[in-house]
Amino acid sequence: MTATVEPTQSDDVAVHVDGLWKIFGPKADRIMKSGDAQLSRKELQEKTGHVVGIRDVSFDVAPGEVFVVMGLSGSGKSTLVRLLTRLIEPTAGTVKLYGEDITAMNDRALLDTRRRRVSMVFQHFGLLPHRKVVDNIAFGLEVRGEGKSERRNRAQEMVDLVGLSGYENNYPDQLSGGMQQRVGLARALAADPDILMFDEPFSALDPLIRRDMQNEVIRLHHEVGKTMVFITHDLAEALKLGDRILIMRDGEMVQVGTPAEVVGAPADDYVRDFTSDVPRSHVLTLKWVMRDPTTAEAEGAPTDGPVLQSDQIVRDAARVVLDHDGPCRVVEDGKLVGYVDDEDILRVVVAEEDAS
């Protein structure tokens, strides 16, 4: 089953992707105009020697959203993020960043957009070894032609923001992997871009450092509010960081949804298997476990006591519900939408234990 998402371009869309294709090979354009484009990835490669990297992908990202693209190796996720800024050329389709058509830009306009509107953070930090931390952070501003005093001041602000104060005059080889990645983050933020794109930035880091860097991204997002497109192969990372998650397989979209939607209503067996080991109480919101208010009212549900939000994570709400004698009200935008009690919470927890 392939997910279909109709993009709805508007002023409120940060990234708009419509019908995006990438076929690798010298006759990609000819294949797009023929029926061969509809062959499976394996069939197309066997028949033509061409490889489908991305097949008819469409989605929107809202301003300020953390949009995670995840999938296993070969799913097309890294190809997709490179298409968003035309680091590789699409075979077909449209990409717009805040209404500007990236796919129609000339080279000069595209270069200006990359310098001013988008910053990328890669797995390999790409730091300049002969430059100090503060100069690495200021490099993009230097390329953009900003004055020395202005870029040094901005770089120092970013040093403080990412927790590198005291290390600004160190060289990259004097820093740990996690600290080097903080330099990469600071460099990306220094240009004050509209969009930050991350291509598996923490894959090479040790687990504890990786967790710290994930928390750092969450903290920075809360502080600066940038739109983020984050690529990962790690489901736990996707669930932790993403407001919404796009799951890919063989270059195609499988499902787009919030973490709770991906875990609570998987689109197919592939997603269901992918999420089978996820602790549901850590991801599902009360919306997924509450009882219908009309049914609960017939059972004599209370009109006072604790009030919980429908988007509250089950685990976070569990203590309030278990400590209260009777059902708790669940609201959304101030309106009663359901009730939840001990049994509703324990049902999720018991299911987790049975699964393990």
Image: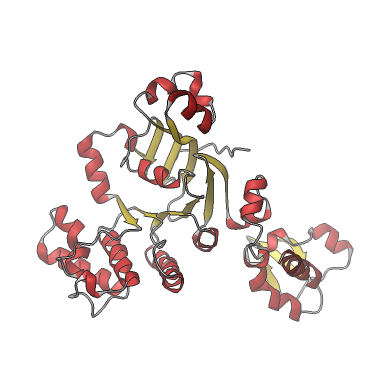
Count of numbered marks? 0
Q: Where is residue 354 in the image (x, y as percent from the top left)?
A: 76, 66
Q: Residue at x 76, y 74 (%)?
A: 304
Q: Residue at x 85, y 59 (%)?
A: 295
Q: Quadrant of the N terminus?
A: top right
In depth, the one of 105 and 125 nearer the eye is: 125
In the rendered image, the vertical position of residue 174 relative to residue 67, given as above or below: below
In depth, the one of 76 and 335 nearer the eye is: 76
Left or right, 260 with reference to 15: right
Tell me if residue 230 can be seen.
Answer: yes
Q: Which residue is drawn at 32% across and 54% down?
A: 120
Q: Where is residue 131 in the image (x, y as percent from the top left)?
A: 15, 66
Q: What is the quadrant of residue 32 in the picture?
A: top left
Q: In which quarter of the image is the C terminus?
A: bottom right
Tell me if residue 11 can be seen.
Answer: no
Q: Residue at x 49, y 61 (%)?
A: 241
In the rendered image, the vertical position of residue 80 relative to residue 232, given as above or below: above
What colour scheme governs how the chains and residues are painted in the rendered image of this protein?
Answer: secondary structure
State the residue lying farthest toward the left. 148
Q: What is the quadrant of residue 301 in the picture?
A: bottom right
Q: What is the quadrant of residue 290 in the picture?
A: bottom right
In the rendered image, the vertical position of residue 244 relative to residue 18, given as above or below: below
State the residue lying farthest toward the right. 299
Q: Where is residue 150 in the image (x, y as percent from the top left)?
A: 15, 64
Left or right, 126 with reference to 48: left
Q: Where is residue 337 in the image (x, y as percent from the top left)?
A: 72, 59
In depth, the one of 310 and 107 nearer the eye is: 107
